Image (spheres, rainbow, N blue to C red):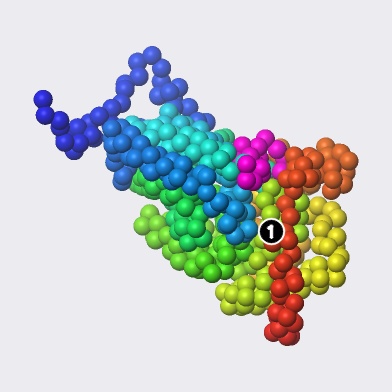
C-alpha cells in the first residue's frame, strides 16, 4: 500500500478528540491546570499551529541534529580549544549553563502540562513534541559542561546551581516557577512560548550561536544552534492561543498575561544577556550592543506581533525602553562588585578601547557609570583591592529578586525617585525595584506574598553567621568556586592612560 502524503491524513489524526462519558469536561480539564475555561470547547477547535510536523519527521530531524552536535563535541574533546577562549567568553558559558540547564528540564513540565491540559487536540500534539524538546535541551546542556569539568570545575554548576540558594538562582528559579512550574496551560502558552521564547530566547540563541562561532567556540555554537531550531518550532504555540482568545472576546486576559511576563522576562534577560553582549564578549567580536539588539529584534518583533493580534504595548513600555540605556550597566556593576557571590568570573569589560565602545553605544556612559569604574581602577592600582569588595548585601526586589538599582536610573535621568517602591500586604512590608514589579505583585499577591528574598532570609536569621562569609556558605559557594575578576585586574593597569582621557571626556 503506497504511503499517503502527510496532507492526506495529518489534520484528521492530529485533531482526534474523545467524548467523555464517565466524567465531565471540567474534571478532565480543571481550570487550575488548564486555564482555558474562558473559551468554550468549540472555540478551541480553531487552534491551529503554524509549524506542522509528524512524529516520523520529528525523530528524523532530532537524530540528525544530535548526530551533528555530538560529533562536533567528540571531534574537539581532546583539543585545547576551551583553554584558548577569551576569559570573558568562558564566563558567558559558565553563567549560561548554571542559569539555564535546569530551567530547560523544568520547561518540560510546562510543555507536558500543555500536552495534557491544553483544550485543543492540535495544541496537545504540538506540546508533546515540545516536551521531548525540553527534555533533550536539559540533557544536552548537562552533558556538554560535564565534559568541561576537567578544565573548569565550576562547569558542574550546570547541575549544582538549582540545588543552592545562590541569589541569581533564586531570581531565575522564582521566575520559572511563576512561568511554567506553578502555572496553567493557557498561561504557559502565552508566557513561556510566546513571551519568553518567541520574543526573547529564540532570538538570543541565534545571536549566541553566531557569537560563539566568531570567538572560535565551535562546541557551544553547535549546541546552541541545535537548541534554537527546536525553540523556533515549539515557541509557536503562543500565537494560535492568542488568536483563539482574541476571537472569543478574551483579548484583555491575554494582554494581562503577556504584560506580566514580558517584564519578568526582561529582568532576567537583561541580567544574563546584557552582561554577556556588552561586557563579556571580546570587543573584536561584538556585532552590536545589547541595546541595539533589543531595539532591532525584540522591540520590532513584539511590536509586529502586538499589532497582528490587536494587542497593545504593555502599559510600562516607555519605562522598558528607557531601561535599555542603563539597567544592565547597573546590574553589571553590582555583579562585578559582588563577584564572590557568582559561580563565574565577571569580566569588568572596561579597558580603554571598551570604554570608547561603551561611550559610543551609550552616550553618557562615562558620566553615569565610568566614574564608578574610575574609583575601582584607582583602588586596584593602589593595591587596595579589598576596597572593591562588598561589605553588606544590597536591597533586593521582592518580585524579581534582583538588586534594586533605581539610583542608577536617576543618574541616567530615567527615574524621578531613587527610593525603592513600597507596598504592605497582610501587615508585611515589601520593596520593589520598579513600578511594573510592584504592579505584578499587587495584581495577584497570593502568587508571591509567601516568598522571602535573600535579604529577608538574612534579616530573619536564616543565614549564619550573619556576614558575607555566612552568605557565601548559604549560597553553596566554596572559596574555589567564588567568582574573581576574569582578567586578574589586567584591565585596570592597561587603562591607566585611558582613565585620564575618560575623566577629561566626562568633565
Q: Position of residue 52 (x, y in %)?
A: 29, 41
Compared with residue 22, is residue 441 higher up or lower down, i.e. above or below? below
Q: Which residues are magenta?
A: 150-167
Q: Which residue is mark 1?
A: 486
Q: Is residue 474 left or right of residue 195?
A: right
Compared with residue 147, is residue 490 higher up or lower down, i.e. above or below? below
Q: Is residue 464 visible?
A: yes
Compared with residue 40, is residue 199 higher up or lower down, i.e. above or below? below
Q: Quadrant of residue 159?
A: top right
Q: Is residue 201 left or right of residue 415?
A: left
- Secondary structure at badge 1 equals loop
Q: How many marks?
A: 1
Residue 260 or residue 362, whichever sits in front: 362
Residue 217 or residue 60, whichever sits in front: 217
User: Residue lying farthest top?
Assistant: 22
As for residue 354 lying within the magenta part, the answer is no
Residue visible at 45% across and 22% down?
27
Q: Quadrant of residue 123?
A: top left
Q: Position of residue 260 (x, y in %)?
A: 55, 50
User: Residue lying farthest left?
Assistant: 1
Residue visible at 60% across and 69% down?
325
Q: Is residue 229 left or right of residue 499?
A: left
Residue visible at 72% across and 52% down?
483
Q: Position of residue 385 (x, y in %)?
A: 83, 63
Q: Is residue 238 visible?
A: no
Q: Position of residue 507 (x, y in %)?
A: 74, 85
As for residue 156 lying within the magenta part, the answer is yes
Residue visible at 70% across and 69% down?
491
Amino acid at each position: 500500500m503506497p504511503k499517503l502524503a502527510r496532507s492526506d491524513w495529518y489534520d484528521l489524526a492530529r485533531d482526534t478528540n474523545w467524548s467523555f462519558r464517565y466524567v465531565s469536561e471540567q474534571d478532565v480539564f480543571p481550570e487550575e491546570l488548564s486555564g482555558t475555561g474562558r473559551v468554550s470547547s468549540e472555540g478551541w477547535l480553531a487552534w491551529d499551529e503554524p509549524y506542522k510536523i509528524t512524529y516520523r519527521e520529528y525523530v528524523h530531524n532530532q537524530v540528525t541534529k544530535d548526530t551533528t552536535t555530538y560529533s562536533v563535541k567528540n571531534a574537539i574533546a581532546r583539543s585545547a580549544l576551551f583553554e584558548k577562549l577569551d576569559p570573558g567568553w568562558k564566563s558567558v558559558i559558565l553563567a549560561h549553563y548554571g542559569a539555564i540547564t535546569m530551567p530547560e528540564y523544568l520547561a518540560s513540565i510546562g510543555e507536558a502540562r500543555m500536552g495534557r491540559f491544553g483544550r485543543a487536540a492540535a495544541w496537545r500534539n504540538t506540546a508533546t513534541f515540545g516536551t521531548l524538546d525540553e527534555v533533550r535541551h536539559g540533557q544536552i546542556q548537562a552533558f556538554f559542561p560535564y565534559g568541561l569539568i576537567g578544565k573548569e570545575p565550576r562547569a558542574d554548576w550546570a547541575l549544582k546551581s538549582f540545588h543552592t540558594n545562590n541569589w541569581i538562582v533564586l531570581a531565575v528559579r522564582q521566575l520559572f516557577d511563576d512561568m511554567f512550574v506553578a502555572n496553567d496551560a493557557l498561561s504557559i502558552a502565552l508566557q513561556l512560548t510566546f513571551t519568553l521564547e518567541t520574543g526573547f530566547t529564540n532570538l538570543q540563541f541565534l545571536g549566541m550561536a553566531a557569537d560563539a562561532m566568531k570567538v572560535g567556540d565551535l562546541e557551544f555554537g553547535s549546541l546552541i544552534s541545535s537548541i534554537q531550531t527546536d525553540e523556533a518550532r515549539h515557541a509557536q504555540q503562543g500565537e494560535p492561543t492568542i488568536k483563539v482568545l482574541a476571537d472569543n472576546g478574551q483579548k484583555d486576559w491575554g494582554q494581562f498575561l503577556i504584560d506580566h511576563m514580558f517584564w519578568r522576562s526582561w529582568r532576567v534577560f537583561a541580567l544574563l544577556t546584557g552582561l554577556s553582549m556588552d561586557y563579556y564578549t571580546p570587543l573584536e567580536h561584538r556585532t552590536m550592543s545589547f541595546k541595539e539588539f533589543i531595539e532591532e529584534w525584540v522591540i520590532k518583533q513584539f511590536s509586529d506581533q502586538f499589532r497582528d493580534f490587536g494587542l497593545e504595548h504593555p502599559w510600562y513600555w516607555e519605562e522598558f525602553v528607557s531601561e535599555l540605556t542603563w539597567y544592565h550597566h547597573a546590574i553589571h556593576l553590582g555583579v562585578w562588585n559582588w563577584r564572590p557571590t557568582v559561580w563565574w568570573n565577571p569580566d569588568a569589560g572596561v579597558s580603554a578601547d571598551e570604554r570608547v565602545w561603551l561611550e559610543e553605544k551609550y552616550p553618557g556612559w562615562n558620566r553615569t557609570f565610568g566614574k564608578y569604574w574610575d574609583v575601582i581602577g584607582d583602588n586596584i592600582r593602589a593595591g587596595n583591592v579589598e576596597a572593591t569588595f562588598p561589605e553588606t548585601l544590597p536591597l533586593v526586589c521582592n518580585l524579581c529578586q534582583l538588586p534594586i538599582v533605581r539610583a542608577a536610573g536617576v543618574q541616567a535621568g530615567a527615574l524621578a525617585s531613587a527610593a525603592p517602591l513600597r507596598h504592605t500586604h497582610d501587615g508585611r512590608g515589601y520593596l520593589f525595584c520598579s513600578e511594573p514589579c510592584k504592579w505584578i505583585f499587587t495584581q495577584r499577591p497570593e502568587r508571591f506574598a509567601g516568598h522571602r528574598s535573600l535579604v529577608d532570609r538574612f534579616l530573619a536569621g536564616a543565614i549564619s553567621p550573619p556576614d558575607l562569609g555566612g552568605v557565601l556558605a548559604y549560597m553553596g559557594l566554596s572559596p574555589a568556586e567564588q567568582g574573581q575578576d576574569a582578567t586578574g585586574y589586567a584591565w585596570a593597569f592597561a587603562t591607566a592612560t585611558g582613565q585620564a582621557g575618560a575623566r577629561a571626556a566626562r568633565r
